[in-house]
Amino acid sequence: MADTLRVERTGEIVEVTLARPSHRNALDDDLWQALRREGLALHDAYPRVVILSGEGEHFCAGMDLSPSNPLLARIAPLVAAHDTYRLSEVIRHLKASFGVFARLPAVVICAIEGACLGGGLELALAADLRIAGESAVFSMPETQFGMVPDVGGTVRLSKLIGRSRASELILTGERIGAIKAERWGLVNEVVHDGTALERARAVAARILKASPTATRQALLALRHADELGDDERFEIETEAGARALVSGEVTEGLASFAAKREPRW
């Protein structure tokens, strides 16, 4: 975990930092697993605030699409075999890596600099609050690669910014800047580049001044009201992601990405 995720606790605040700066903190198999392990551990650690951030200039560039990512090697034969069942199981496992943060009995704040793309944006959506540097960029490019944002993206994004705007981001793969993201309600606040983490810490300090019980109960009430009906929506999302993968179009999507050319669908 030390190679991919850094965890530091100061009093009642825990900072979880994606630590693959040379890869723009892209999600490889180790990082997915580390996020799930640490998220589960935090459920027993009782912090009041958790801050998610990325080391270096970027928060997270999404899934690591390099051939060295073991996760892709595991998925490839399932895609070739049109194994929707096992692909759905893989997606559920990945979804759980972010879900543990969405269910933490603590306020989760995401400090975003630079790229917040694909799976990185899905992780940010699992937080309660998002603070972004002014040069941060956001997108859900999965459909451009023959995939679906299936680790919480379709559900959480549409709830946060509305179906119409979520449809625009997901169906076009368009990148938007921090100012537009704030206007759409995707982020809570835009700050000067390089200060998102500092601002997140200031917000965390303010949260700590409030009643711990009142804060936790308000948080649970907010999440409960927001998550009614999610089980079915998440399951639809999981099955949609698996069906997209078994179509085989992901093979062309990844090949065109590696070759730096337009995909031939």
Image (spheres, helix red, strand yellow):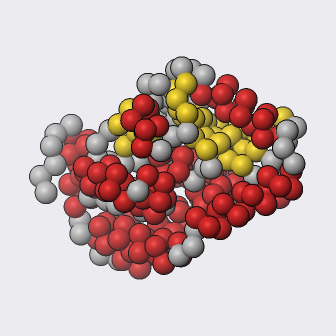
Residue 13 against residue 248 in the figure, above or below: above
Q: Is residue 207 left or right of residue 21?
A: right
What percent of the width, then of the height, locates residue 49?
A: 76, 44
In front here: 14 or 65? 14
Q: Is residue 181 left or right of residue 13?
A: left
Residue 220 shows in this picture: yes
Residue that appears at 47% across and 25% down: 134
Quadrant in which residue 9 is drawn: top right
Residue 234 against residue 149 in the figure, above or below: below
What percent of the width, then of the height, locates residue 204?
A: 75, 37
Residue 196 against residue 18 in the figure, above or below: above
Q: Residue furthest left?
A: 264
Residue that appears at 52% across and 61% down: 94
Quadrant in which residue 223 is drawn: bottom right
What percent of the width, then of the height, locates residue 193?
A: 52, 20
Q: Quadrant of the C terminus?
A: bottom left
Residue 68 shows in this picture: no
Residue that appears at 58% across and 68% down: 227
Residue that appears at 32% across and 56% down: 164
In front here: 156 or 179? 179
Q: Is residue 48 left or right of residue 195?
A: right
